[in-house]
Amino acid sequence: MTSPQLEVRNLRKSYDDGRIEALRGVSLTINAGEYIAISGASGSGKSTLLQLLGGLDTPTSGEVLFEGSALGNAINLDEYRAHRIGFIFQAFYLLPTLRAIDNVQVPMMAVSGNSFSRAERAEALLSELGLDHRLNQFPNELSAGERQRVAIARALANHPSILLADEPTGNLDSVNSGRIMEILTGIQKKRGMTLIIVTHENDIANAAPRHIRIRDGRIES
Amino acid sequence: MSFAGFAWKNLWRRRLRTLLTLCGIGMAIGAFVALVGFSRSFEMEWQRLYSSSGTDIAVVDKNFMNTSVNQSLQEKLRTVPVVDKADPMIFNIMDVTPDVNALVFGWLDDSYEFSSLTFISGGRFHNGKPEIILGEMLARNLNKKVGDSIDLQGSSFTIAGIYHGGTALEAGAVIMPIDQLQQLSSLQGKVSGFHVRLRPAPAGESPEHYLKRAQAEIEAALPGLNAQAAADRASNNQFVGLAHAVAWGTSCIALLMGILGIANTMAMSVFERTREIGILRAIGWKAWRVLLLIQLEATVLGFVGGFIGIAFGWVALRLLSTLPQTASVVSTSLSWVHLLEALAISILSGLIAGAYPAWRGSHLSPVEALRHD
């Protein structure tokens, strides 16, 4: 029997010397290639869970296992984020001084390759996402939907096996929101990636094959 | 996009701040280039001063500035077998006008050191007479010609000749009869020391060994005096030492200001880019790579500032070489070693200045950095 891709064991995360408990003993398993939506009210702990799954932060107690190995112990968090994870944020978080094609190259600089091969891959990814005519635009010259597509291309740059999206449609109108979800689910199917989306939009959450609801730092269902 | 290109784009986003920082480090490096260049050219001029007259050894008291050696020792010095010529000299600095001071040498009118001078007009002075000769640069700055008079320490001296000297020190100097300078200084019978030209080294003896043997023989003949090789005397005299100390001291202060300027720029930059650093960490950049990026930006500031500083320094030296007050001791020639030193110091300044901001940036928690407004 193969181990799950991600396994969360009794995860707790508190802030402010324990006065704020964001997660209160969360456990779950995620298999490779799953598409999961995590929903909950503001402050429920869903983004904190995503950050811990992505190795952006370390838990107060409990552990996250990737393919059976504990993050932060057996697996270096920087390596994990660089090679295994692709992050997509609500506010896009593109670097404002870089053109779209350069933004997509930034994660690749953490790994290897020469600038020519990086540029080639960045161009291919942006073309795949329908932005081949916007390669040299700076973020402030792009629409919100285009920015999020650049952010998706950046998340895919290092061939991750897991895509983590924190409210990816939060800053988009309904048309762009639908388009971005189509792209994400399309990528998940085409590449067999694990897709974990944090959202507070019921439509998006309910469309996912697996829906995890979080309330007050605990999994509700 | 290359790593260096990324660093440059980060710097260029705040053009005005980057340019002002470059000016700051440029001024600091410029001060180093000009001041240390000045002190080194001063030392070089001293070396050329000795070599152009063919002086091998300077026989002096322990204190360079003292005019306390008995002139009567000249005869004894001339009896030392290795000595070919030995002439007394006095060295001083005097106000020639309220604005211009000059090196003043006292020589005998038959000193062998005249061989390094070429008279443009007039000729030598005569012992016992109130006559002087002027270097061509000093004569030009003072607008004086042969036959004019100059007032020194309240006494009037007639210009007997204007000469072309082999060094900037000579070109800006006054040379006068040693007895006249002794009178002006109220130090009759005393000299600063003797300049000695040695006989040719015997066949089979190396020049270095011969020089050491000559020094020992002279010191044995004149107990209490130092016989120093001319090259050592040029490098180690108190004027050169003082010039080096002032140049390095002032340069260090200027460099400290430049380093603080870069550090301030980088600290501001890291603070403003906290969220971006969080993004870099989130997408897999390791802490050391963030550190390297910030250090590279600081180093680029230092490197580019170094080139600007070299240009500033060269212009400053050019200006100093045209001022009457400094023209006699400033050469505009800059050695490659000095320029490489300036670049190395500017790069080192960038590395030092970037160290703390880089450390701080690289140790930001990705989550905390992403939350930063």
Image (cartoon, helix red, strand yellow):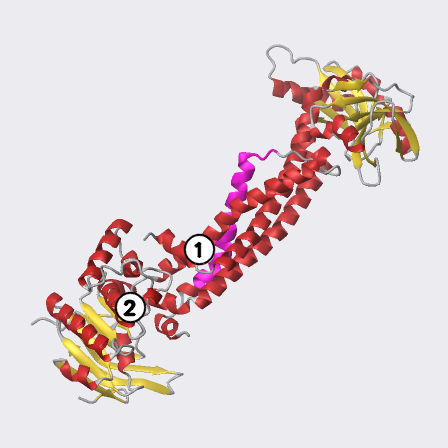
Residue B51: horizontal and vertical position, in percent?
A: 67, 23
Judge left or right: residue A20 versus residue B337: left
Q: In the orientation shown, which residue stands out farthest toward the top?
A: B203
Q: Amino acid at mark 2?
A: Arg
**Foreground of the two, A91 or A219:** A91
Residue drawn 68% across the image and 45% down it: B246
Name which quarter of the figure residue A143 lies in: bottom left
Q: Residues within 10 Å of mark 1 (few under 14, many from 20)?
A: many
Q: Which chain hosts label 1? A: B
Query: Is residue B136 shown above or below A130?
Result: above
Q: Residues within 10 Å of mark 2 (few under 14, many from 20)?
A: many
**Image height of B165 relative to B82, above or below:** below
Instruction: Determine the secondary structure under disc 2.
Output: helix
Q: Which residues are magenta?
A: B333-360
Q: Is residue B357 magenta?
A: yes
Residue on which disc 2 sits: A147
Q: Which residue is mark 1?
A: B297
Q: Within the magenta stretch, is there residue A160?
A: no
Q: Quadrant of residue B191?
A: top right
Q: Where in the figure is residue B24, as x and y percent of width and height?
A: 57, 54
Quick one: SS at disc 1? helix
Q: Quadrant of residue A38?
A: bottom left
Q: Is residue B105 left or right of residue B156?
A: left
